[in-house]
Amino acid sequence: MKGKIAVLLSGRGSNFRALYKATKKGKIPGEIVLVITDKKEAPGAVSAKEYGIETLYFRRKDYPDKASFDLAMAEEIKKRDVELVCLAGYMRVLSPEFVRKFRGRIMNIHPALLPCFPGLHAQKQAIEYGVKFSGATVHFVDEGVDSGPIIIQAVVPVMQNDTEEILADRILKEEHKIYPEAVRLFLQEKLEIKGRRVFIKK
């Protein structure tokens, strides 16, 4: 039986599409059953509808506060017996209430080698700091910003003439490889969290 996945996104959804393609090719033993967006016209949400995936739009101003907004999303996810929640360019920090509902079952991908350069514009941060290598990190989500236990990382060089956009494109190619791999390992029950460390079972 395939594991059920929900994806939260706010933008173009390139990592969502990478996950979807991996499920269709059998590289992930799961199925994306739900996409939730906070941006009605997000390209990722448009793609989800084209793929025939149930897609829900949640508007922040329809809810009195962040916690009630997140708990409404959580309720829809729970209704569908989802095993894993994947953030794919979701531009809101999840509330502690949401994280508690799915602790150890929420993944995010970040375009830097965490714990370096969390938050927005990670590629710009890397260039301005002058690092010679950056990359991408798949991690479990906790109550902080890009601070949860690390699952997989990929390293890319930072070139002298890189702009934020050029570095972002180089990192994105690696994101599309390691995110499906992390999801595969999770659904095959090969990931074990011990404190801050994630162990991959053989």
Image (cartoon, rainbow, N blue to C red):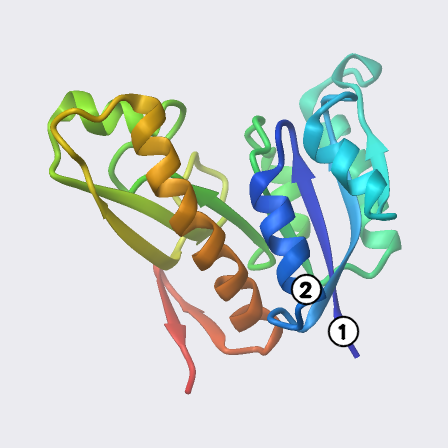
Q: Amino acid at mark 2?
A: Thr
Residue 71 in view in this figure? no
- The x, y position of residue 171, in whole percent, is 35, 42
- Label 2 residue SS: helix
Quarter of the image where one finds residue 150: bottom left
Which quadrant of the figure contains the C terminus? bottom left
Left or right: residue 149 versus residue 101 is: left
Which numbered disc covers residue 41?
none
- The x, y position of residue 48, in whole percent, is 78, 41
In this view, the residue in front, 78 or 130, is: 130
- The x, y position of residue 169, in whole percent, is 38, 35
Left or right: residue 107 versus residue 152 is: right
Identity of the residue furthest to the bottom in this view: 202
Q: Amino acid at mark 1?
A: Lys
Residue bearing mark 1: 2
Q: CA distance from mark 1 to mark 2?
A: 10 Å
Circles 1, 2 touching at the beta carbon (< 8 Å): yes
Residue bearing mark 2: 23
Instruction: Write the residue at 41% across / 39% down.
Output: 146
Alpha-carbon neighbours of circle 1 within 10 Å: few (<14), some, or many (≥20)? few
Instruction: Write the residue at 68% across / 54% down.
Output: 20
Residue 100's place in the image compared with 111, above or below, is: below
- The answer to which of marks 1 and 2 sits earlier in the sequence is 1
Quarter of the image where one finds residue 42: top right
Left or right: residue 174 versus residue 82 is: left
Which quadrant of the figure contains the N terminus? bottom right
- Label 1 residue SS: loop
In this view, the residue in front, 33 or 19, is: 19
Left or right: residue 141 versus residue 125 is: right
